[in-house]
Image: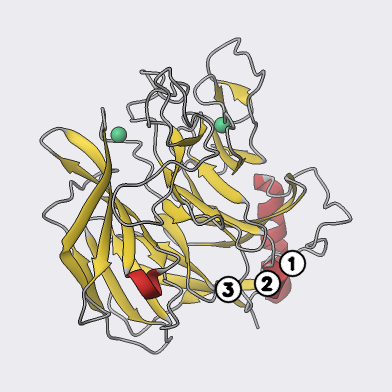
């Protein structure tokens, strides 16, 4: 039975080309990749009721060992990080502010690195005001209850118009540099009709970076690429040429920014985002011209990509630092929303190594991965509303 399963997995791997042609480099800390089938996916909190349409799981570094899960309609739940827990509280409810449905909604949540002292957290959501726009806002925990945010504490930091309902990006997270990074989509429709990805006078189609270390309005970090320009380029921009980077993350060990950019017709891609980089959309989709005869000069190609024969909407994850999964340490764990497949990509010196299929969420709707304050890794199933994790298979 066990051998049959291994053979089936091996056959599947050949079928979907889940291993790249590259071999791990000698200095790759993951030169001994995990064997396929080594990991099982189990419910992380089996006693807890479903959380409707979760899109983000994260935790502040405040020493309390709690988990926060944001739902697309506009709620954030909080609960103890205990596998036996059944209780959860609504930390924040902004359903009345949020426009949701399709790709709209509350799309991202990030806690301040100084949350323990300042109580600040940040959200990314869409609203109708009355026309559709993205809102980046700061909230604060209530004075008297650590499991309750103050709903009246909202300070809106940035808004920008969304010309179409799709491609709103959504992720926001603090880098190891203490700055807040924000993913925006190209604004939507298909094929980036307004060429937002390459237009640095708009915040659409970008990775943004702002300094929110002081209360009040945000500041532009001194070394942002367009800081101080006089030609109307947006100073918030950190990198550009993105289509819909729904999820990105920082490797807490190396500080590297990993983004997964959802593709158009053919290719899903993984990018290592660097300051001032142009990631190619829309002249390029993945490693190919999207606009025929495109000039690739100066464009940064993906570290890895896969075709729509394998999956059709990438969900970016994390470089695993999960101490319960030592075989995955340093590997970029990511998946596909539609197929539910999850892979572990090894890498060294910004070059992809081996890519192994390590699991599959039944039925897909793999909306996000998450990390708790101990860097343990989680998987969110959007339609089930359940939270999963990997365990080393017996
Ligand atoms: Ca949009
Ligand atoms: Ca690209």
Label 1 near label 2: C-beta < 8 Å?
A: yes
Mark 1, residue position:
35
Q: Residues within 10 Å of mark 1 (few under 14, many from 20)?
A: few
Q: Residue at x 48, y 43 (%)?
A: 221
Give the percent coordinates (x, y) of residue 351. Answer: 75, 44
Q: Residues within 10 Å of mark 3 (few under 14, many from 20)?
A: some
Mark 2 falls on what kind of element? loop
Alpha-carbon distance for marks 3 and 1?
12 Å
Q: Residue at x 58, y 38 (%)?
A: 275
The picture quadrant where one finds residue 116 is: bottom left
- The answer to whether residue 123 is seen in the rendering is yes
User: In the image shown, does 298 or 266 lie closer to the viewer?
Assistant: 298
Q: Name the quarter showing ligand 1.
A: top left
Give the percent coordinates (x, y) of residue 167. Answer: 35, 36
Mark 2, residue position:
38
Residue 383: assigned label: none
Label 1 near label 3: C-beta < 8 Å?
A: no
The mark nearer the N terminus, 3 or 1, is 1
Q: Is residue 385 left or right of residue 90?
A: right
Check the image and tell me how it is coloured. Answer: secondary structure
Mark 1 falls on what kind of element? loop
Q: Is residue 182 above or below residue 163?
A: below
Q: Residues within 10 Å of mark 2 (few under 14, many from 20)?
A: some
Q: Is residue 145 left or right of residue 278?
A: left
The picture quadrant where one finds residue 293 is: top right
Mark 3 falls on what kind of element? strand
The picture quadrant where one finds residue 271 is: top right
Mark 3, residue position:
40
């Amino acid at each position: 039975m066990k051998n049959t399963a291994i053979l089936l997995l091996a056959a599947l791997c050949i079928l979907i080309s889940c291993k790249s042609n590259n071999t791990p480099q000698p200095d790759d800390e993951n030169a001994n990749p995990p064997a396929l089938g080594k990991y099982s996916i189990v419910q992380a909190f089996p006693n807890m009721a479903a959380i409707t349409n979760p899109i983000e799981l994260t935790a502040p570094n405040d020493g309390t060992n709690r988990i926060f899960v944001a739902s697309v309609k506009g709620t954030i739940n909080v609960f103890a990080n205990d596998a036996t827990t059944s209780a959860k509280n609504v930390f924040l409810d902004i359903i009345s502010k949020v426009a949701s449905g399709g790709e709209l909604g509350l799309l991202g949540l990030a806690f301040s690195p100084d949350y323990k002292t300042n109580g600040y957290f940040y959200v990314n959501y869409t609203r109708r005001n009355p026309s559709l726009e993205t809102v980046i806002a700061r909230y604060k925990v209530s004075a008297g209850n650590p499991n309750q945010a103050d709903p009246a504490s909202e300070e809106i930091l940035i808004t920008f118009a969304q010309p179409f309902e799709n491609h709103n990006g959504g992720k926001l997270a603090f880098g190891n540099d203490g700055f807040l990074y924000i993913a925006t989509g190209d604004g939507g429709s298909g094929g980036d009709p307004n060429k937002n990805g390459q237009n640095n006078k708009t915040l659409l189609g970008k990775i943004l970076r702002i300094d929110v270390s002081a209360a009040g309005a945000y500041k532009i970090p001194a070394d942002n690429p367009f800081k101080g320009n006089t030609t109307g380029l947006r100073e918030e921009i950190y990198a550009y040429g993105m289509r819909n980077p729904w999820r990105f993350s920082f490797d807490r060990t190396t500080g590297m920014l990993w983004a997964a950019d959802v593709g158009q017709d053919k290719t899903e891609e993984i990018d290592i985002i660097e300051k001032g980089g142009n990631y190619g959309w829309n002249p390029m989709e993945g490693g190919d011209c999207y606009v025929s005869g495109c000039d690739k000069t100066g464009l940064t190609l993906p570290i890895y990509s896969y075709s729509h024969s394998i999956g059709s909407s990438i969900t970016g994850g994390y470089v695993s630092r999960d101490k319960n999964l030592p075989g995955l340490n340093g590997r970029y764990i990511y998946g596909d929303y539609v197929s539910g497949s999850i892979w572990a990509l090894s890498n060294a010196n910004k070059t992809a190594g081996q890519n192994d299929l390590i699991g599959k969420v039944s039925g897909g709707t793999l909306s996000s991965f998450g990390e708790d304050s101990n860097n343990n890794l989680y998987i969110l199933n959007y339609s089930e509303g359940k939270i999963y994790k990997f365990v080393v298979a017996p």
